[in-house]
Amino acid sequence: MKTIKLLLGNSEVRFGNLIETLVRKGCADQAILECTRVAESGDLAQKGCEGAFDLIIAVPEKVRPDRRPQGTLGPFGETVRAISAIKAQRTTPVIALLSKEQEQAALIEAGADYVVGVPFNCEELKALVRQVLALTQPAAGAVPTRWSFAEALIRGFHRLTQS
């Protein structure tokens, strides 16, 4: 099975968990996901330039800027700088998740391949991840190979009410 390496730039744990879960579900039974998380823009730039990642997802508003003696550009500006540095050395696809539409142009200019608005549709993000990673779409109506406890309860209740 193929291994996908994801670099996730985000300092908020819950939002990071959601994104990682969506990418895992997007990979489904086609790949194993290895996720590296970074919270600061300097780490994002360093790991993005040095590592062999298949995909980078950055949340500019949630990446902390580095502490520099000369000052910072703020979370957004430092993330734009990091994406620009990564794209100068690597061709790794970058997806940026952003809540402010007026800042999309700066991310695209820095080299982000896709900019997705927050809030986003989870199914659309999974489809975008599959497209970027060149994974096939899951078959429509395919039964998952492994159910969660909640899914098993719902299916059991559904069967009971149909009887």
Image (cartoon, grey):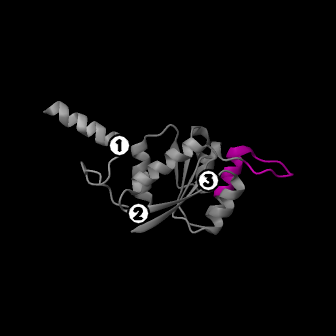
Residue under the image location 50 percent in, 44 percent down: 18
Residue 43 occupies quadrant = bottom right
Residue 148 coordinates in the image, percent (x, y): 35, 45
Q: Is residue 159 above or below residue 90?
A: above
Mark 3: few/some/many CA within 10 Å (<14, 14-19, 20+): few
Residue under the image location 53 percent in, 55 percent down: 113
- Residue stretch rendered in magenta on the structure: 65-83
Residue 23 coordinates in the image, percent (x, y): 46, 53
Q: Which mark is residue 109?
A: 3
Residue under numbered circle 1:
149
Q: Which mark is residue 140?
A: none
Residue under the image location 56 percent in, 47 percent down: 16
In the rendered structure, which amino acid carries the disc numbered 2? Answer: Ala
In the rendered structure, which amino acid carries the disc numbered 1? Answer: Phe
Residue 116 in view here: yes
Residue under the image location 40 percent in, 52 percent down: 25
